[in-house]
Amino acid sequence: MLERYKNTLERFVGPTKVITYGNTLQVDDYSKFDWTVFNPDEKKARHETVFPVKLKEAYKLGAELV
């Protein structure tokens, strides 16, 4: 689906790059919610390890636009 969106944007706007980041933190404090489907410790660990890397990728991609 993302590839389709990318192709559509390229037809109308020009060269397009896509960056994705999933399995993110939805809230700061999972204890306030009855969400048994999420593992708060895993979410926090992923946020602390993967998010900084993806943030740098996004920053670099944004810098290329300028």
Image: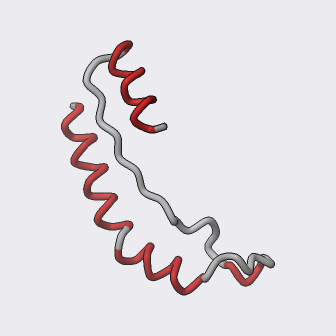
Q: Nearer the viewer, residue 12 or 58?
A: 12
Q: How many marks?
A: 0
Q: Position of residue 64 (x, y in %)?
A: 19, 37
Q: Which residue corresponds to the image point at 45% horizontal and 29% vertical from the top-left?
A: 5
Q: Residue at x 40, y 77 (%)?
A: 48
Left or right for 35, reference 19: right
Q: Position of residue 27 (x, y in %)?
A: 64, 69
The vertical placement of 29 against 2, above or below, is below
Place residue 7 in its image quadrant. Answer: top left
Asked if residue 64 is positioned above or below residue 30 in the image, the reply reads above
Q: Where the C terminus falls, by quadrant? A: top left
Which quarter of the figure has residue 62? Answer: top left
Residue at (38%, 66%) from the top-left corner? Answer: 51
Estimate the x, y position of residue 2 in percent, counting from the top left.
44, 38
Q: x, y percentage for residue 33? A: 78, 76
Task: Name above or below for residue 29 compared with residue 16.
Answer: below
In the displayed image of the protein, which residue is found farthest to the right?
A: 34
The picture quadrant where one finds residue 21 is: bottom left
The type of colouring in the image is secondary structure
Which of these two is toward me, 56 or 39? 39
| Residue at the (54%, 86%) spot, across then down | 41
